[in-house]
Image (cartoon, rainbow, N blue to C red):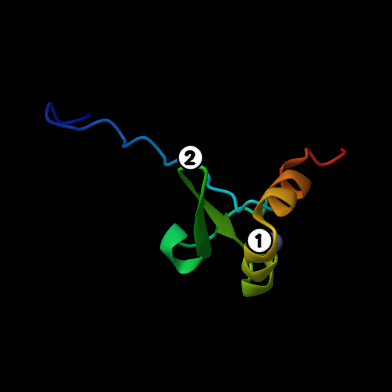
Amino acid sequence: MLPDDAKPAPEPEPALETVCHRTMTTAPENYYHAEYQGRIIYFCTEFCLDAFRADPERFYIAHSRKRPK
Ligand SMILES: [Zn+2]
C-alpha cells in the first residue's frame, strides 16, 4: 500500500545535447558553452568551442543539420 502522502515521481529532466548532438551525461555546466542568438549552446569539447568562436554562424549551421539515420 502507498502512503497517502506519497508524492508523484519528479519529471525527468529532458536529455540535453551539445550542439554536435552528444547527449550530456553530466550537468550542463560541466560543458563548454557560449551564447548564440540569445541562447546558450553547449559544446562537447574545447575544440568545438574554438571552432564556434572562429565562425559562429558557419559552425552552428553545420552542426545543426540533422544527422542522417
Ligand atoms: Zn562537438
Per the image, label 2 sits on a secondary structure element best described as loop
Q: Nearer the viewer, mark 2 or mark 1?
A: 1
Which residue lies most toward the right here? 68
- Which amino acid type is marked by label 2? Pro
Seen at 18% across and 32% down, the residue is 6
Seen at 64% across and 51% down, the residue is 19
Seen at 12% across and 30% down, the residue is 5
Q: Is residue 18 left or right of residue 28?
A: right
Quarter of image, ligand 1 = bottom right
Q: Residues within 10 Å of mark 2 (few under 14, many from 20)?
A: few
**Closest to the observer: 31 or 59?**
59
The CA span between labels 2 and 1 is 24 Å
**Closest to the observer: 5 or 60?**
60
- Mark 2 near ligand 1 (CB under 8 Å)? no
Counting from the top left corner in percent of width and height, residue 42 is at: 55, 56
Counting from the top left corner in percent of width and height, residue 54 is at: 68, 65
Q: Are marks 2 and 1 in contact (CB under 8 Å)?
A: no
- Which amino acid type is marked by label 1? Phe
Q: Residues within 10 Å of mark 1 (few under 14, many from 20)?
A: some
Q: Quadrant of the C terminus?
A: top right
Q: Quadrant of the N terminus?
A: top left
Instruction: Count every numbered label the image shows and give the total.
Output: 2
Determine which residue is flagged by label 1: 52
**Closest to the observer: 60 or 5?**
60
Residue 35's mark? none
Per the image, label 1 sits on a secondary structure element best described as helix
Up/down of 58 relative to 54, above or below:
above
Residue 14's mark? 2
Counting from the top left corner in percent of width and height, residue 17 is at: 59, 49
